[in-house]
Image: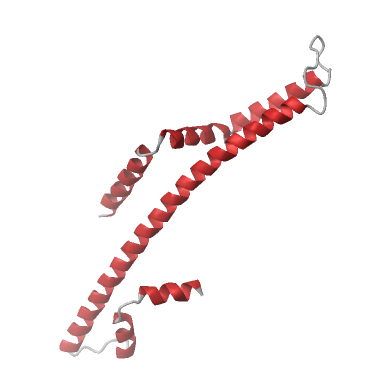
Amino acid sequence: MASENVAAMKARDRAIEDERSLLQRVSDAVINAVSGGPSIAFHATWFAVWAAINTGTVPGLAPFDPFPFPVLTMVVSLEAIFLAQFVLESQNRLAKQSHDRAKLNLQIDLLAEREMTAVLQLLNDIATQLEIKTSVSREQLNDMIKETDVHRLAEDVER
């Protein structure tokens, strides 16, 4: 049963991945590419070479963007703007997936609660019929058998 559930969740996750738009796929690819060590190394090298050339420390190469490096500042600013947009796109999609999964979990939890209430009621009926003394008091059992008021519970959580 557990393996079937895991397989079902994997299939659901694959379907969600397959349904991504072109923009979402591009955003994910860009984020994956720039979030690793090679990207950090590339940027560190790029900035060091740019600074070396434009401070006149590389013989034979004339500075083309003298200090305070206005062209580099513009390029890095544009890169940051676009990367921020890609990150926001990916985060929004992942937040929606997380929200959808939380709603699914809530539905499963409510179903499990309803089933457990029915099981408790059946056990109570059997214990009563067979006159079995239980370690749980009737008051405790009756309290557990009560149907959960989801709206009241949600209000209590919000307070």
* Residue reaching furthest to the left: 129
How is the model colour-coded? secondary structure
| Any part of residue 12 in sight | yes
Q: Quadrant of residue 113?
A: bottom left
Give me the residue at 64% from left, 36% from top. 80
Of the pair 130 and 14, the residue shown nearer to us: 14
Compared with residue 75, is residue 61 higher up or lower down, i.e. above or below? above
The reply, left or right, for residue 51 in relation to residue 92 is: right
* Residue reaching furthest to the top: 60
Query: Where is residue 25 drawn, in percent x and y?
Result: 44, 34
Query: Where is residue 8 drawn, in percent x and y?
Result: 28, 48
Query: Where is residue 2 drawn, in percent x and y?
Result: 29, 54
Query: Where is residue 159 drawn, in percent x and y?
Result: 51, 75
Give me the residue at 34% from left, 41% from top. 14
Q: How many circles with numbers are drawn on the protein?
A: 0
Q: Quadrant of residue 36?
A: top right
| Any part of residue 130 in sight | no
Q: Quadrant of the N terminus?
A: bottom left
Compared with residue 138, is residue 112 higher up or lower down, i.e. above or below? above
Give me the residue at 36% from left, 63% from top. 106
The reply, left or right, for residue 9 in relation to residue 129 is: right
Q: Quadrant of residue 18?
A: top left
Of the pair 39 and 78, the residue shown nearer to us: 78
